Image (spheres, grey):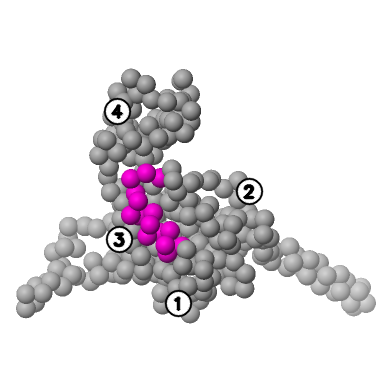
Amino acid sequence: MTDLAALLPRIERLLDRLDSAAAPRGLDWKTVRAARWAAQASALKPILHPQRVALKDLLAIDEQKQRVDANTRQFVAGKPANNVLLTGARGCGKSSLVKAVHAKYAPKGLRLIEVDKSGLPHLPDLFDLLADADYRFVVFIDDLSFAEHEPGYASLKAALDGSLAGPSDNVLIYATSNRRHLMPEYMAENLETRHLGGEVHPGEATEEKISLSDRFGLWVPFHSMDQDTYLAIARHWAETLNAPADDGFERAALQWSLGRGARNGRVAWQFARDWAGQQ
């Protein structure tokens, strides 16, 4: 018994050290401007070299830039602002726009936290870490979509509106998706639609899928671009990379887009990098 009594204080000290090591530690937000949420460890990992995008380099999305910039400006100023869902055509600048407004407002106290889909069930833990910080945070969920009955769906829905463990006033959620309602939609669900007294009433399955996207206060749609817009963006990036367009530029850019099966800002950027590398 004597040996056990002497051993107990050592065991308690060891457990205290383990608890201390496992406890989530905050970041120095004065120097860290972006982080990644590691849900399994309930901790934030700093992103030492966040990708920087300038708003002036995002062409052909002026209306989208204005809406997201205005919402972010309100948020950073401590005024009411909305969670944002950016949806639509792939490669047209949804993620780049979020990174660009972060780069613009980071000197004014805006911080960006990247969360992947597996981290959605642990959002309340993240909100607890951020609640008392003297900064403004955008929780960024990129390329968001759900299959049927995925657990993260209900977690995000509750986090946006309806949960007691929702974000504090210094946190907003910005998400991007190629799907407006974030989930696959099937023809059979449209058959549930009823017509009563001349009014259209969607079925329960459709209502449930709309209910998630409907909790984002601001919807920002992106659309496919035409050939002239694609070429203008490719030319802009080529000039930015000090590789001006010559007579064969447009032909090469169009052949590149045909090979990729798309005309969008991402494809234009990739072509410009290839063009600049060959000059």
Indicate yes or no whether the magenta region holds residue 123.
no
Helix, strand or loop at mark 2? loop
Disc 3, disc 4: CB below 8 Å?
no
> Residue 61, how many percent across, how many down?
34, 49
Q: Is residue 139 left or right of residue 199?
A: right
Is most of the magenta stretch helix, strand or loop? helix
What SS does tag 4 mark? helix
Q: Three-letter amino acid code at disc 2?
A: Leu
Q: Residue at x 27, y 45 (%)?
A: 224
Spatial CA distance of label 4 from label 2 is 36 Å
Q: CA distance from mark 3 to mark 4?
A: 32 Å
Left/right placement of residue 36 relative to residue 140 reads right
Image quadrant occupied by the N terminus: bottom right
Q: What's drawn in magenta, residue-wise?
A: 58-72
Q: Which mark is residue 163?
A: 1
Q: Nearer the viewer, residue 169 or 145?
A: 169
